[in-house]
Amino acid sequence: MNTAAEIKRRLASVTQTKQITNAMYLLSVSRLKRSMESIDYEKKYVEMLRRTMEDVLQVTKGADIHNYYIDKSPLGTALFMSVMGDKRLCGDYNHAVAELTKEKLQTKKDPLLYCFGMVGKEILAADGIVLDRVLPGSSMHPSLELAKALSKELIDMYVTDQVNEVYIIYTPYDGARRPVSFRLLPLLRHDFVDAQDDYSPNEMLYEPGAQDALDAFVPKYCSGMLFSMLMQSAASENAARMEAMQSAADNADEMIKELQTQLKTARQLSITNELAEITAAIKP
């Protein structure tokens, strides 16, 4: 059995750990609240984006317009953007995204890979996966400026046939909070589940024309979708860390109770042994 001094040291260590996990829990709660202030708006904005893109795609379909945003090029390769965190201690959040990323990479020939977050870089590099670009800090603190700059870069790569598909692997902030792969480009009509086959292009008019409307709207659509996915990933990461820290604090409470019981037992045993020694010493 451990001595009382050893148990005290362990008890102090576990108590200190609990204080740290409580602090991290409160920090995650604060960050999650800030994320939630705008995430509902972002979801509504994304819904409007997709509805508008659906309308534009239906008009281009009726007008028999062929466009590089719609028609996949045989040139180039697929580009995956994997959104993970810069910190650990958030359960299986990062590993779940990494596993889906590795799974999706195997479905394409010579794909490119962008990774948000230093933890993602470490996990993927440990498996021998080569990353073409790492974006540290951008997953925890997403910004619209970053989304716009990245969208412009992605579109430039797409229209110059450097890539012919762009996917974003991220964790939606919903009940399941499991990573998904979303195709950002090309804009395939069957990806828009609300599209109606009997839609008539006469129902909506575009000036100067559907082609110009598509060219003007796609960059806004891409930057809006990317920003929303970064926001949702940040909220999911904070929620996962909050749950992990709460679980760690609960485990620490159980360990503290057990160590306190052990300490009490050790003290009682020590007192019993001392009494036995005293009794033995005073016997004739």
Image (tube, helix red, strand yellow):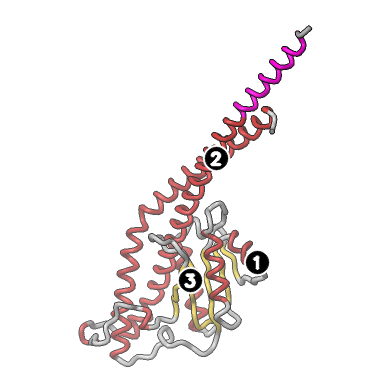
174 vs 150: above or below? above
Among numbered discs 1 and 2, the one appearing first in the sequence = 1
Identify residue for label 2.
252
Tell me the amino acid under the disc marked 3. Answer: Ile
- Residue 209 visible, this orientation: no
Residue 36 x %, y %: 37, 53
Among numbered discs 1 and 3, the one appearing first in the sequence = 1
Identify residue for label 3.
168
Residue 125: give its label.
1
The residues bearing labels 1 and 3 have C-alpha atoms spaced at a distance of 19 Å
The residues bearing labels 1 and 2 have C-alpha atoms spaced at a distance of 33 Å
Between disc 3 and disc 2, the foreground one is: 2
Q: Secondary structure at mark 1?
A: helix
Q: What range of the chain is rendered magenta?
A: 263-282
Quarter occupied by residue 283: top right
Q: Is residue 226 magenta?
A: no
